[in-house]
Image: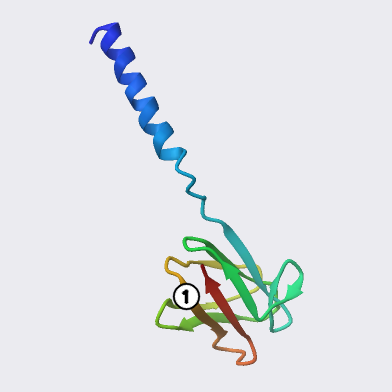
Amino acid sequence: MSQQKNFTRSLGLAALFAALFSTGVAHAAEVEVDQKNKAFVHDGNKIEALTIKVGDTIRFKNEDPFFHNIFSLSDLKTFDLGSFPKGQSKTVVFDKPGLVEVECAIHPEMYMEVTVQ
């Protein structure tokens, strides 16, 4: 291929990438929610509600010396992370807007609402 064709092709690819990455699309975030003292904890505070954006991931990390089993039976997002011990974490991507109720199958007092915007 000639230098002119390579240059033109490179310019075209550069324009395509610029268009794709300048659309203002925000990158998805990962939010850590700990399980500590049989509660959901975010940024060191016990929470019962959390607001995130579509496409965000929540990393559920067990900080208790016993197992947790985080799940949701919500129509919007159904999942069951299974039992996992202290120090382990599991993630869930929230890909649709709405309300998701999150619980622990082992500790019924653990309840949190996730609003996905």
- Identified at 50% across, 79% down, the residue is 100
Which residue ends up furthest to the top in the rendered image? 3
Which residue ends up furthest to the left in the rendered image? 1
In this rendered view, identify the residue nearer to me: 4 or 31.
Answer: 4
In this rendered view, identify the residue nearer to me: 57 or 18.
Answer: 18
In this rendered view, identify the residue nearer to me: 75 or 18.
Answer: 18
Q: Position of residue 70 (x, y in %)?
A: 54, 79
- Identified at 60% across, 68% down, the residue is 88
- Crowd around label 1: few <14 · some 14–19 · many ≥20 (10 Å): some
Q: Position of residue 6 (x, y in %)?
A: 30, 14
57 lies above or below 76: above
Count of numbered tags: 1
* Location of residue 78 (image quadrant): bottom left
- Identified at 51% across, 67% down, the residue is 117
Q: Is residue 41 left or right of residue 51?
A: right
Indicate the amino acid at tag 1.
Answer: Gly
Q: Position of residue 90 (x, y in %)?
A: 54, 68
Helix or strand or loop: what does disc 1 sit on? Answer: strand
- Indicate the quadrant containing the N terminus: top left, top right, bottom left or bottom right: top left
Determine which residue is flagged by label 1: 98
Q: Is residue 37 left or right of residue 102?
A: right
Q: Is residue 44 left or right of residue 26?
A: right
Q: Position of residue 15 (x, y in %)?
A: 38, 27
Q: Is residue 106 left or right of residue 10?
A: right
